[in-house]
Image (cartoon, rainbow, N blue to C red):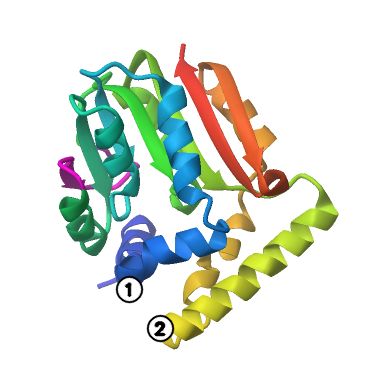
Amino acid sequence: MNLPAEKEDWRQMRRMFGAIAPRYDFVTRAFSYGMDRRWKQFAVRKASLPQGATILDLACGTGDFSRIITQSIPAATVFAVDLSEKMLNLARRRSPAKVVCANAMKLPFPDGMFDCVFVGYGLRNFADLYAALQEIHRVTRTGGLIVSLDFFLPANQIWRKFYLGYLCAQGAFWGFLLHGRPRLYTYIPDSLQSFISVEKFSALLLHWGYAQVEARPYLRGGIGLHWAIKG
């Protein structure tokens, strides 16, 4: 039986992220020159959330963001959501977050439940970015935050070509060294081919009704941190 495209995409993503789960954090650090954790810590500090906040860590992966959040805000209630059970098994060991396996386009939460939604390296991997943003917007309370850390397409065309080439080389190197599969980590530059720049994502958040959008580009626009308040 042929699965609908959405179901097939979901199954493929679960299979891929299940394969890379044990090495995911190491490779993330390698791709970011070791700055990934510092960016996440800064993202949480700048959000300035109250102790009793209810927080969603969407596309949580191994739970790295969840761990930083629970260390910084011990009294917060954190839900860690991902579509890969293998990633979630690692997340369970790393933080006291409530772990949920779910699709970002169909979140099992009521409207306005969260004070903040964190998304670490997830947006560009969603099969439908607009549907995912709609769900994030729905489950965030008015006045709540979305905080995103992700890879982006640099606006400068010359740097963009160099950056994508660098990501391909890094991905092939680590994929072959760690798994014997050079193409395994080239999903990062592959996912960027149809993605957008830091500036365009800021404009997209404004279009979705967010206010006070702030962005911090890193690696000359190859990485972006966004904070935005739901209007």
Mark toward the start of the polypeptide (1 vs 2): 1
The count of marks equals 2
In this rendering, the answer to whether 57 lies above or below 192 is above
x and y, in percent, of residue 205 in the image:
55, 26
For image coordinates 61% across by 34% down, the residue present is 201
**If the image is split into quadrants, where does the N terminus sit?**
bottom left
State which region is magenta.
95-107
In this rendering, the answer to whether 164 lies above or below 150 is below
Looking at the image, residue 141 sits to the left or right of residue 155; the answer is left
Q: Is residue 176 visible?
A: yes
| Pointer 1 with pointer 2, Cβ within 8 A | yes
Q: Which residue is mark 2?
A: 179
In this rendering, the answer to whether 18 lies above or below 47 is below
* Mark 1 Cα-neighbour bin, 10 Å: few <14, some 14–19, many ≥20: some
Question: Which residue type does callout 1 highlight?
Answer: Ala
In this rendering, the answer to whether 114 lies above or below 102 is above
x and y, in percent, of residue 111 in the image:
26, 21
x and y, in percent, of residue 110 in the image:
20, 25
For image coordinates 71% across by 68% down, the residue present is 165
* Mark 2 Cα-neighbour bin, 10 Å: few <14, some 14–19, many ≥20: some
Q: Residue furthest bottom?
A: 180
User: Could you give the CA–CA distance between mark 1 and mark 2, rounded to whole angstroms?
Assistant: 9 Å
Residue 37 is marked as none
Looking at the image, residue 55 sits to the left or right of residue 29; the answer is left
Residue 19 is marked as 1
